[in-house]
Image (cartoon, grey):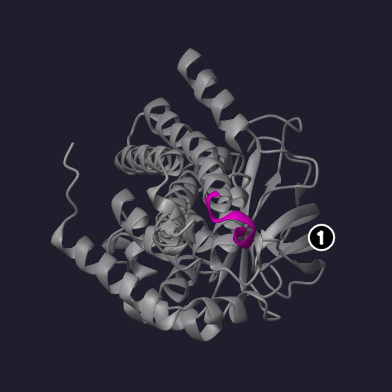
Amino acid sequence: MNFEHTEDRRMLSDMLRRFVAEQYDFATRMRHAESPQGYSPEFWRRYAELGAIGALFAEADGGLGGAGFDISVVFEALGRGLVVEPFLDAVMVGSAIAAAGTPAQREALEGLIAGGITAALAHAEPESGYDLNQMATRAQRTADGWVLDGAKAVVNAGEHADIFLVSARTSGAQDDETGISLFLVSAGTPGLGTQGYGLIDGGRAAELTLDKVQLSADALLGEEGAGHALLERATGRGILALCAEAVGAMDCARDATLEYLRTRRQFGTPIGSFQALQHRMADVLLEIEQARSAVINAAAAVDHPDRTTRERALSAAKYTIGRIGTLVAEECIQLHGGIGMTWELPLAHYAKRLVMIDHQLGDEDHHLRRYIALGQA
């Protein structure tokens, strides 16, 4: 496997890192995260102008890249700044539209890449857990289209999204893989309700209610009842994105801790000279490199035609990130001492984000079980 990025990817990485470092400092990030929208529409458009959104999609779909390594490059740079703009849902919803959208539906993808609109994936439900096939929301066919009833939980940036990708069951039992369909629902559709709230690691999410939401026939994305495979591929790219974001956040937590160990003095000497702390920091550095290797493996496999190969690599990466992310968060805070827990120090926010990444799109335990099950299939 070639571990070297192409020249275009190196340029994209350097450009995004400079932009985040120079234009998206910690104070700016917190201002966006604590705003009523939970992100900055202005910066969303600026990221689009830089090509950061376009890099997530193939040229055939109007983007600039779309490969696994393009996704990892973008999200690693975003993770360094704890960027709260809605990139994660953009890559998942956009990937689903790119794979199965009609020409009319693909207009939303064009708006997404241009930064003119935002999209949100509305799949998780209050009692569904992490399994994609667990779904109580129902869609009934009518003479004019569809009627949706149900509820969705923790929809990122759901209060202000322009379009939702909503999963609903059109047939089968609540835990069947078959019978799941996907629908594109515009914000403001009668019967669609949102209740927003702030997230512990910054930004906002919303609970969605669907009360007899009437949709036209062309709202269906892809084939009726065949949405599980499409949803799995879309969330797979989201898993890769989260893992790469975590590596970027780990790098920053590591750098901040190394700097603290060099400058904090005790008994007249930098605490970084203490052998016990050096050993702990060395373990952190090794674990971060293991996490980086897992992301590289997932990026190489995200478009693999064999489902087992692809999904095992993604679950392995998510499990690794969950375990190592928690370790890095704990060790970096402990090596800082009490100051590591203060809200004013960026490290506390990196640690919080690393812990919360573990719980998005399946936690460490879920993906370990999934990895084992895929190997036995």
Q: Which of 166 and 5 is in front in this view?
A: 5
Residue 335 vertical position relative to residue 23 in the rendered view, above or below: above
Is residue 316 one of those drawn in magenta? no
Residue found 31% across the figure and 42% down from its top: 296
Helix, strand or loop for the magenta stretch, by majority: helix
Q: Mark 1 points at which residue?
A: 209
Q: Residues within 10 Å of mark 1 (few under 14, many from 20)?
A: some
User: Which residue sits furthest top?
Assistant: 376
Helix, strand or loop at mark 1: strand
Residue 314 vertical position relative to residue 352 in the rendered view, above or below: above
Q: Nearer the viewer, residue 329 or 149?
A: 329
Residue stretch rendered in magenta on the structure: 335-340
Q: Which of 173 and 199 is in front in this view?
A: 199
Residue 109, x across and y down, in percent: 45, 68
Q: In which quarter of the image is the N terminus?
A: top left
Residue 257, x across and y down, in percent: 45, 57
Q: Is residue 58 left or right of residue 338?
A: left
Q: Which of 65 and 225 is in front in this view?
A: 65
Residue 214, x across and y down, in percent: 76, 63
Please indicate, yes or no, whether residue 49 appears anywhere in the rendered image.
Answer: yes
Q: Is residue 130 left or right of residue 324?
A: right
User: Which residue sits furthest front?
Assistant: 267
Please indicate, yes or no, whether residue 217 appears anywhere in the rendered image.
Answer: no
Residue 213 vertical position relative to residue 113 in the rendered view, above or below: above
Q: Is residue 372 left or right of residue 6?
A: right
Residue 346, x across and y down, in percent: 55, 67
Q: Which amino acid does label 1 sit on?
A: Thr
Residue found 35% across the figure and 44% down from its top: 292
Q: Is residue 15 left or right of residue 343?
A: left
Residue found 65% across the figure and 59% down from its top: 341
